[in-house]
Amino acid sequence: MNMDNEQEGVRLLQQYAHSFLTSQVMFAACELKLFDVLAESEEPLSTAAIAERLGTSIRGTRCLVSACVGLKLLDVNFKNGEVFYKNTKLSQSYLTTVSSTSVCDAFKFYSNEAYPAASHLTDVIRHGNPLSQIQSGVPPNMFFKDIYRSEEKMMTFMKLMDLSWTSRTKRAVISAFDLSPFKTICDLGGCSGDLAKYCASLFPSSSIIVYDLPEVIKTTKEHFVSPGDDHIILQQGNFFFDPLPNADLFILSRILHDWEDDTCLKLLHKVYMACNPGGAVLIIEAILNEDKTAYLPYYMHNVVILLFTEGKERTFSEYKGLLETVGFKNIQLSINGDLLEGILARK
């Protein structure tokens, strides 16, 4: 390794070593509402002005805003020898709580749940079991019961699920296949109904069922799906233990990656039996390449899955094997180059 390559390698390792601080700086800025304060101001603010409005120390505020500049979350203006700060377009759009595209609430899951759990990653890797099972001996499905134990935590998780559904992702996955012939569509674990509402807009002659746990359906009804969404039916149930509605198309979006193979087979068998003749199942997941390589966020999300559930990210061949085992055929993969891909399989 020559001198330049060695220096670049060390810099890369230093970047990795500091990555946990990158997220914490952003989370702290969101929690303190730094970006809200700057959004409310008509002009850029000095460190002292920001500290006064946040109720924080000048020393700590100076460190925070400087780090946010380095992360390209704040811009700086120089005036009369003093530094003033303002939001970038990125932070203004996504890190202010009043923005319609805010991700602040969704990021609370990473800040409050994933970050503390990650400090035990070595133990989880050693044992191969979710952290809750290692620490308390509880089964893997307790993760979801814990997440849903309060409406605040549930709302955070539901918003996190919606976060990955950018309009580009929804358009790319759903338009990859002709789904218009399916007149009854059931979104298993449909959460806030965000995907269901998108399907309803594309297929107005179809009925869309959002099937999820009773506490999730209650929150969805109160906060996400309005009475005006007349094509959407909210149905409560546990898809492992309760009967599934009959449907022409079942959608399983980011469901199977939370479970080990045997559990996935049991669920897919239930789906196959409830699927009308000529129907299909659409699986939406992050799909690894056959050699297990992938875009970096796939690997990082796989670590989150390892911490909390018994599942894993899979290749197309692995999903194809699960689907064929329970009887599905004519299995197709969409390739849209986004974080989520679709797999359509026919009954």
Image (cartoon, grey):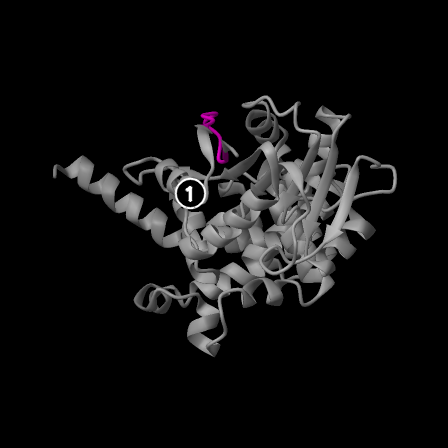
Query: At which x and y percent is residue 81?
Result: 59, 39
Residue at 19% x, 35% y is 4
Judged from this view, the residue extending furthest toward the left is 1
Residue behind mark 1: 298
Which of 167 and 282 lies nearest the eye of the viewer?
Answer: 282
Query: At which x and y percent is residue 235?
Result: 74, 50
The region drawn magenta spans 333-342
Query: At which x and y percent is residue 99?
Result: 73, 40
From the viewer's perspective, tell me whether residue 193 is left or right of residue 171. Answer: right
Do we see residue 22 in this rendering? Answer: no
Which of 298 and 292 lies nearest the eye of the viewer?
Answer: 292
Element under label 1?
helix
Query: At which x and y percent is residue 162?
Result: 64, 43
Judged from this view, the residue extending furthest toward the bottom is 136
| Three-letter residue code for mark 1 | Tyr
Judged from this view, the residue extending furthest toward the right is 227
Residue at 71% x, 29% y is 183
Which of 294 and 228 lies nearest the eye of the viewer?
Answer: 228
Judged from this view, the residue extending furthest toward the front is 277
Quick check: 46 above or below 174?
A: below
From the viewer's perspective, tell me whether residue 317 is left or right of residue 245. Answer: left
> Which image quarter: residue 157?
bottom right
> Which image quarter: residue 56?
bottom right
Few, some or many C-alpha atoms within 10 Å of disc 1 (few <14, some 14-19, many ≥20)? some
What secondary structure is the magenta-colored segment mainly?
A: loop
Residue at 42% x, 73% y is 134
